[in-house]
Image (cartoon, coloured by chain):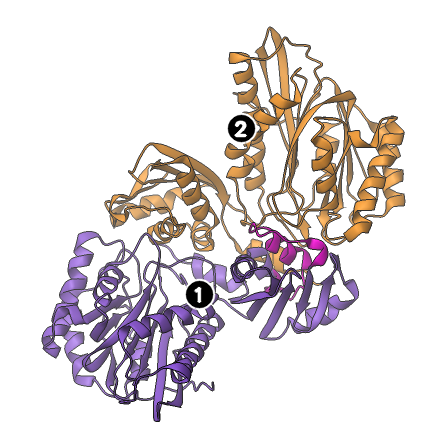
Chain colours: A orange, B purple
Amino acid sequence: MQVQLEAGPVAGFSFAGVQAGLKSSDRKDLGLIVAERPVPAAGLFTTNQVKAAPVILAQERLRAGHLRAIAANSGSANCFTGRAGMKLAQASCLALARELKCAAELVIPCSTGVIGHRYDFERYQAGLRMAVDALSPQGMADFAHAIMTTDTTAKIARTSFRAAGTAITVAGVAKGAGMIAPNVATMLSFILTDAAIPAAALRRTLAAAAPQSFNAVTVDGDMSTNDTVILAASGAAANARLAGRDLALFQEAVNAVTHELARQLVFDGEGATKLVTIHVRGASSATAARRIARQIANSPLVKTAFFGCDPNVGRIAAAAGACGVPLDPERLELRIDKVKIAARGMILVDALPAAAQRMHERQFTVTLDLKQGKQAASMMTCDLSHDYVTINAEYTT
Amino acid sequence: MQVQLEAGPVAGFSFAGVQAGLKSSDRKDLGLIVAERPVPAAGLFTTNQVKAAPVILAQERLRAGHLRAIAANSGSANCFTGRAGMKLAQASCLALARELKCAAELVIPCSTGVIGHRYDFERYQAGLRMAVDALSPQGMADFAHAIMTTDTTAKIARTSFRAAGTAITVAGVAKGAGMIAPNVATMLSFILTDAAIPAAALRRTLAAAAPQSFNAVTVDGDMSTNDTVILAASGAAANARLAGRDLALFQEAVNAVTHELARQLVFDGEGATKLVTIHVRGASSATAARRIARQIANSPLVKTAFFGCDPNVGRIAAAAGACGVPLDPERLELRIDKVKIAARGMILVDALPAAAQRMHERQFTVTLDLKQGKQAASMMTCDLSHDYVTINAEYTT
């Protein structure tokens, strides 16, 4: 399914992004997504044991399966902030609920930024009022900018399709890749659709989309305390019930949007100069393929070799063998794009220069065939560069 | 138990290290450890599914519980070299067995260096003859140099104690930390003693020493294809049977030597500017403590923060929460050396400058108290610096 990268409206939702002064820079830092009335929604959250206050609150509230508004701020993660942090998250939702004249339980809070830091509530309240005034169906780009931290670009993706006799739109925004930047945590993503579809179906759709998108990317393997993905459906398309092929099309649209957002996250990963897809095939199970792909994608030695344009068979094979999945080194086949660099447990030395050439591209694929079975999995990762170290080390408290 | 860092004799063993021309540089690259007769021995090997030919052979042979000689080369890992690699390892052992007039099964091969590369057998044979001629009880330092790859210093440790009425020596050499340097894999370590002690006891001693030494260190979390640790006992001390307190002293000596070697490995880790001990305590089980310590020790974000002397509570807490061990963020207590920087789920902001000061030292300790129970575990790690990226990226095939 074709995906566009521009912002645009999703019927039934309005958006805003304003500068509330929550962070030191003079950038937007508070964003709103507001539905015309309570709408079905589903969420996915970090599995980290250390969860930010807004994550705990959002997870609890989305169990009911609906939301009226999402309030997302950058500049402060409101994590590791104790009871005061939870009170702040609750008060923030209540403030927006009053503006919108809805129950506080219908407001979903999200925060990203410095861990251990609470934002200033007075400024937040003033910002909320500005944001409510600014709400507009055309405000998605403003929202996308308001949630950026160390991102160098806003991440937006959208697609449309016809199902149940109606045109349906799925669009999403995202920020950050994994744990990123000085004291800044979080991947946030918000996927919106005008489809009429109940919360239970949204939950299943989001759960099915995650393994091939947000759970198939890594920048540094570090798991954030604030990761949040929300899928909400306004129903404004007034389509008939999505089932069978129509439901499959909806899933395909959500897959396409989430995969594209995930791709943009890795492409904009800290210090990244390359986007590398690790494709493991010929595995005896999809789980085994995923574990091996993840081990390769997170290996610092493999990632520095990517940075150095080095088709280092040994490091990739060693990473593949390190995650406990049984494999036969004698059968491994390894390719950089279409260039085969290892087969039958031996390095194909003559092919290495051509493979190194491929690795100078901004994007390439590493394919490892285990020759054990028919299952496969992919991960998107980036290289480990000097800039990664600079970005993450050059900070002093 | 006090540990010395100088090389010296271990009665019953002789050593050599020569330049056989197996690597491009003009350095020693072939080392021998030879016992006067077959002696009890035990080994620990990489659990990587991709194992070098010499590892497969060594593991198989040490099941019998004895060895006459260890032949270790640098310059080539003889891994990912297919059947030709296995034949090369076998022929190498046979060549030494002929020189020593012993069974080939009593020769344990070890290789470290470029993966996918086989060494030149003619040069190896000629080197073996030189090495056999050079064998000497005083040759441990030569041996230690012959197995170095990207190591900047040779790693040696020794200790002595009295047990069963006799003076007993335990000494060891090691090289490399985890997977290191362009295409070079491997941690090798050889621990020798003049104690009279059977193979079964050596196996138990080595297994007990590993969790607090070689399995308690990380440089980049990458698992090598060639890791090998061997403990061999000449029996030259002619002590009475080691049991009870005497056996405990022997364990203590092996613990002290292996811990010191592991410490030297991390201290000499690629690009490392700091040695950091991660101590997790107050856990409900030692396994839980070890998993959390390992997750913190391997986190690129934590390691870059170490490099930047940044007491980054958020990254450490997020890493602790990421490994699946249940924990209560509200109870976490975090210290850099003795400076408390977090308690009751909050950052102690005023303490951060003092903590940052501690992190400018060459060695410091991060202590995380979970306040759940009484179990603890430690890991030694290093920082992630620009030099790590340079060393591992600046290589082109």
Residue A208 badge: 2
Secondary structure category for the residue under label 2: helix
For the point 60% across and 56% down, the residue is B320
For the point 32% across and 74% down, the residue is B202
Left or right of A14 on screen, residue B120: left
Is disc 2 surrounded by few (<14), some (14 to 19) or many (20+) residues within 10 Å?
some
Residue in the foreground of this view, choosing between A357 and A86: A86
**B261 shown above or below A242:** below
Secondary structure category for the residue under label 1: helix
> What x and y, as percent, mark residue A340?
29, 41
Q: Amino acid at mark 1?
A: Asn
Disc 1/disc 2 C-alpha distance (Å): 37 Å
The residue that mark 1 highlights is: B215
Left or right of A239 on screen, residue B295: left
Q: Amino acid at mark 2?
A: Ala
Dot 1: chain letter: B
First to last magenta residue range: B305-331
> What x and y, as percent, mark residue B265?
44, 71
For the point 17% across and 75% down, the residue is B128
The image quarter in which residue B103 lies: bottom left
